[in-house]
Every structure is written in structure tokens, then in C-alpha cells.
């Protein structure tokens, strides 16, 4: 499309240049852009952009880039932001044309959102893969019923649930299985990652997390190590920013922002260390227990199915020797360590000798820990 009403200043898309007289270029009908971020790390700026008014952005972009030559797979830079923010030219119609006052500018953000949405987790774990924890499985049925039909619950909707129990008992595994079977987004995050470097960072991260989950509802937010940000008040002097973070978390958990169809699940090894104001927001506290003898046997059998070496083991004896160990301990500390020991000794088969080595190396003596800081 030719436009002879005005001669625009001609510049290339990748650099600031002086005027270039070009008589045979067409003006662009439409340019499709994808935001790609800053050319280098800039800690004071957020690489995510949020377009609240597409028409306003189009006018802003057209005014800034008027006269630029646009070529597909090259870049435009927003020179009003320091450092310049980059946009990839996905499509230019026609290619190698000039942005005019009539050029339509469209922005693709979906792919960027997926790339930047690092907290969103996908999993293939099923509830049937989790051995034991019958009580926990029964209690989360309310989440299943709610997320399957949110409108039916109304004011009776579950909002905040606390998982607690020793490490390795399956808290994270259960929430992954739940989200997978319900086919809803899971936003899984370590509480420590919500703590920022500057004042206000923590509150902003919490707000962004809940906003993202709300935009993709129904969804589940899983905050692991809850006590790291919601520390009991008796310990708050150790953390100067805890008050700000707790207040932001309380605001979101109270539903002031109307996070419809969003379930918040917190996890902790020690619920007594959580600030009472936060703990009181959890409608249900679900305990995760260590596996009993039968459950430890099932965990061993399930993990041995994928063992890369042959094995000759007395599983009944191992069950008795591993009382008090979690499912994760059985896999990581016993079976994996015994596998590594067998390979290190050029053995083709894992035997009880390798298991005994793993048991000995995994033991932590209480007296060693007790005197550590004395």
C-alpha cells in the first residue's frame, strides 16, 4: 500500500539513524510484535510488561516508531525506557516496509507469559502413585469437588489449607497429583523466593503470584516452607521485612482481591512456627505422617521397579531397619545410596551389603546436632 500524503523519516528497525530517502518502499499495513525484554540484565526493572490498553499502546508505539523500516525477525526498541526494551518483529505486512500513521501494531504476549511464568508447574503424578496418606487424600476431596464446580459452593468455597508433617512425607507430591488430575494450573513456589532484595519486593511478589493464579483460575497456589515468610511473632525480630510480607499474604488469603476459584495450600514441617494471624486463615490443617511398615514395603517395591541394576535384597529386613524414615528418605538415602555404592565397587547387583552401607551413612546422631552451636 502506497501512501503519498506524507514523507516519513526513514530509519532502520535496529538502530537510531539520520534520515534516509527511500522512494520505493511501501508503508506497513500491520506489524506484529513479541516482547523479548532488555538487552542486558537491569535489576531495577521488571522484564515483564503488562498492556492494560491495547489501543493506547498502539498509538504510543506508532508515534515512537513512525518512519522506521520493519523487517521480519529483526527488532524494535522502546527508546523511552532505559535501557531500551526490545520487541521482535514477528510479522510485517508487507515485509521490509515503513511504519506510517496508518500502520496497525499488534502485540503477542502469550508466549512471553508462558516463558516468564516460572512458578507454573506441570506434572504426570497421579494420586494413585502416592503410597499411604489416606487421611490427606480424603480431606482434599473438598478441593476436587470445589474446583470441578466452583459456582455450586458460593460462600462455602475452600480457600486456604495447610499441609504439615516431616520432610519427605509427600506434601508436594500430593498437590502435584491433585493439580494434574484436575487439569488445573499449579503455581508451586518456595516461600524463600518471595523474599526480595528491597523493601516492598516481597509484597509485590506475593501480589503478582495471586494475580497470575487468579487470571488462570481455577488454579492452585502451593507455598512450600510457609514458616520462612510467615514466621511466628516471637521470632520476627530476626527478620525485619516479615511484617510487610505477612500483611500482604493476609490480604490475599482473606480474599480482598476476590481470587475466585484459587486454592492456596501452604506447607510446613512445623506449624507451631507459623505466625498465628496467618495460621488462623487456614480452614483445614492436614497432617502428613511417616509411612508404616506396609507402606514402606510398597514404597521400596515401587522404586525398585525402575532400578538400573539387578538386586538381591531382603525387603522385609529393610522395612524393619528403616522405621522412622520418610518415603523420600527410602528412595534418596537408602536405595539411591546403595545403588551408587554398588556401582562404585563395580558390582552388577545391589545386595544387602550395599543397603547396610546406605543405612550407616544416612544416620545422623542426635549428640552431633545438639552440640553443633554450643
Image: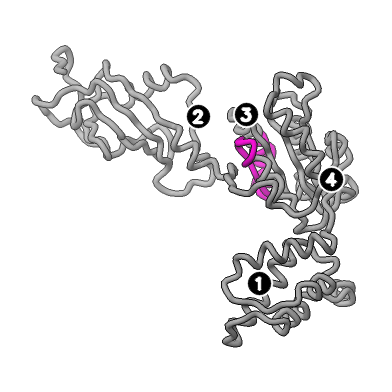
**Which residue is the site of mark 3?**
217
Label 2 – label 1 distance at C-alpha: 45 Å
Q: Quadrant of the C terminus?
A: bottom right
Q: Which mark sits nearer the N-terminus, 3 or 1?
A: 3
Residue 119 point in image, percent of width and height:
59, 44
Q: Is residue 132 magenta?
A: no
In the image, residue 233 sits, relative to residue 159, either above or below, namely: below
Residue 145 point in image, percent of width and height:
73, 29
In the image, residue 102 sits, relative to residue 203, either above or below, namely: above
Label 3 – label 4 distance at C-alpha: 27 Å
Q: Which of 107/234 is in front?
A: 107
Label 4 – label 1 distance at C-alpha: 29 Å
Numbered tag placed on residue 135 in the rendering: 4
How packed mark 2 is, by other alpha carbons closer than 10 Å (few <14, some 14-19, many 20 or more), is few
Residue 86 point in image, percent of width and height:
37, 38
At 19% from the left and 22% from the top, the residue drawn is 27
Instruction: Please report contact status of discs 2 and 1: CB closer than 8 Å, yes or no.
Output: no
Instruction: Please report contact status of discs 2 and 4: CB closer than 8 Å, yes or no.
Output: no
How packed mark 4 is, by other alpha carbons closer than 10 Å (few <14, some 14-19, many 20 or more), is few
Q: Which mark sits nearer the N-terminus, 2 or 3?
A: 2
Q: Which mark sits nearer the N-terminus, 3 or 4?
A: 4
**Which residue is the site of mark 2?**
50
Q: Nearer the viewer, mark 2 or mark 3?
A: 3
SS assignment at label 1: helix
In the image, residue 55 sits, relative to residue 160, either above or below, namely: above
Amino acid at each position: 500500500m502506497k501512501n503519498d500524503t506524507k514523507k516519513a523519516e526513514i530509519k532502520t528497525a535496529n538502530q537510531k539513524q539520520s534520515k534516509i530517502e527511500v522512494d520505493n518502499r511501501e508503508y506497513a499495513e500491520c506489524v506484529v510484535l513479541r516482547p523479548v525484554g532488555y538487552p542486558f540484565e537491569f535489576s531495577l526493572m521488571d522484564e515483564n510488561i503488562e498492556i492494560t490498553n491495547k489501543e493506547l499502546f498502539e498509538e504510543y508505539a506508532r508515534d515512537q516508531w513512525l518512519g522506521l523500516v520493519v523487517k521480519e525477525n529483526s527488532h524494535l526498541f522502546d527508546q523511552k525506557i532505559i535501557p531500551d526494551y526490545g520487541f521482535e518483529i514477528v510479522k510485517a505486512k508487507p515485509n521490509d516496509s515503513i511504519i506510517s500513521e496508518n500502520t496497525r501494531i499488534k502485540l503477542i504476549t502469550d508466549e512471553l507469559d508462558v516463558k516468564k511464568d516460572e512458578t507454573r508447574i506441570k506434572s504426570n503424578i497421579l494420586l494413585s502413585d502416592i503410597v499411604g496418606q489416606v487421611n490427606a487424600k480424603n480431606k482434599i476431596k473438598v478441593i476436587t469437588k470445589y474446583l470441578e464446580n466452583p459456582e455450586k459452593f458460593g460462600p462455602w468455597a475452600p480457600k486456604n489449607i495447610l499441609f504439615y508433617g516431616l520432610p519427605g512425607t509427600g506434601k508436594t507430591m500430593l498437590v502435584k497429583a491433585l493439580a494434574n488430575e484436575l487439569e488445573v494450573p499449579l503455581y508451586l513456589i518456595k516461600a524463600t523466593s518471595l523474599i526480595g532484595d528491597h523493601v516492598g519486593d516481597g509484597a509485590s511478589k506475593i501480589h503478582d503470584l495471586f494475580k497470575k493464579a487468579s487470571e488462570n483460575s481455577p488454579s492452585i497456589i502451593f507455598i512450600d516452607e510457609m514458616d520462612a515468610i510467615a514466621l511466628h511473632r516471637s521470632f520476627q525480630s530476626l527478620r525485619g521485612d516479615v511484617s510487610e510480607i505477612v500483611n500482604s499474604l493476609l490480604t490475599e488469603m482473606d480474599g480482598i482481591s476476590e481470587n475466585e476459584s484459587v486454592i492456596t495450600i501452604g506447607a510446613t514441617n512445623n506449624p507451631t512456627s507459623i505466625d498465628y494471624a496467618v495460621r488462623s486463615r487456614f480452614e483445614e490443617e492436614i497432617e502428613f505422617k511417616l509411612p508404616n511398615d506396609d507402606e514402606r514395603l510398597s514404597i521400596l517395591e515401587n522404586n525398585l521397579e525402575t532400578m538400573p541394576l539387578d538386586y538381591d535384597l531382603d525387603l522385609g529386613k529393610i522395612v524393619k531397619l528403616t522405621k522412622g524414615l520418610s518415603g523420600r528418605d527410602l528412595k534418596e538415602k537408602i536405595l539411591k545410596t546403595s545403588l551408587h555404592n554398588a556401582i562404585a565397587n563395580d558390582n552388577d547387583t545391589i545386595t544387602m551389603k550395599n543397603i547396610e552401607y546406605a543405612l550407616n551413612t544416612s544416620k545422623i546422631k542426635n549428640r552431633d546436632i545438639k552440640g553443633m552451636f554450643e
